[in-house]
Image (cartoon, rainbow, N blue to C red):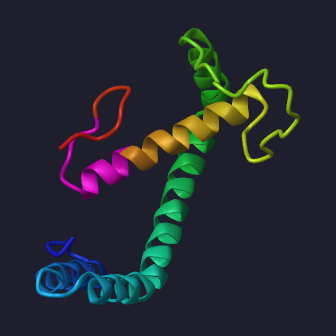
């Protein structure tokens, strides 16, 4: 993070590195207090960064959808060809449906596409490569 071109991200990276140096010399209680302070100081900027990146991803997807209206349907068909993921809690008799989970094939495809683009962006920003079909690796 400290090598980032963005000043706000580089500042957080520098503060984190400095904090790590201080933590080694502190008692556990003092170290925990320092961590709590640090987390409180970076939550706002990190939330802003997350909002900005989500907006960029949304614009990118909208751009792609405007150029290829069939993309969600084609992607949904592709996802249907993949092996289904098993839900360990499915069939437990409880009716606690997660309303945030997309229900239609097209909504599921858009959610998967968004997640994939986000993973690619995180991998690129952290200098890692995103493997095909998996999470970024070091």
Residue 49 % position (x, y):
44, 73
Residue lying at 27% horizontally and 84% vertically, measured from the top left = 31
For the C terminus, which image quadrant? top left
Q: Which residues are magenta?
A: 120-130
Residue 30 % position (x, y):
28, 90
Residue 57 % position (x, y):
50, 55
Residue lying at 21% horizontally and 86% vertically, measured from the top left = 27
Return the residue nearer the eye: 25 or 135. 25
Determine if the magenta segment contains residue 126.
yes
For the N terminus, which image quadrant? bottom left
From the viewer's perspective, tell me whether residue 73 is left or right of residue 99.
Answer: left
From the viewer's perspective, tell me whether residue 110 is left or right of residue 115.
Answer: right
From the viewer's perspective, tell me whether residue 25 is left or right of residue 54.
Answer: left
Q: How many marks?
A: 0
Residue 29 picture quarter: bottom left
Return the residue nearer the eye: 61 or 91. 91
Is 78 placed above or below 55 here? above
Residue lying at 18% horizontally and 87% vertically, measured from the top left = 26
Residue lying at 60% horizontally and 29% vertically, measured from the top left = 71
From the viewer's perspective, tell me whether residue 84 is left or right of residue 30.
Answer: right
Residue 97 picture quarter: top right
Residue 101 % position (x, y):
72, 40
Determine if the magenta segment contains residue 107.
no
Return the residue nearer the eye: 120 or 38. 38
Residue 17 picture quarter: bottom left
């Amino acid at each position: 993070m400290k090598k980032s071109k963005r000043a706000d991200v580089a500042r957080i990276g520098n503060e984190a590195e400095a904090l790590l140096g201080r933590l080694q010399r502190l008692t556990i209680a003092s170290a925990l207090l320092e961590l709590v302070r640090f987390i409180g100081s970076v939550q706002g900027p990190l939330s802003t960064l997350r909002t900005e990146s989500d907006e960029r991803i949304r614009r990118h997807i909208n751009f792609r959808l405007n150029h290829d209206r069939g993309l969600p349907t084609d992607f949904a068909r592709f996802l249907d060809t993949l092996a289904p993921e098993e839900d360990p809690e499915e069939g437990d008799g409880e009716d606690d449906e997660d309303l945030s989970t997309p229900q239609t094939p097209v909504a599921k495809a858009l959610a998967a596409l968004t997640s994939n683009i986000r993973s690619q962006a995180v991998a690129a920003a952290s200098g890692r490569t995103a493997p095909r079909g998996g999470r970024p690796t070091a």
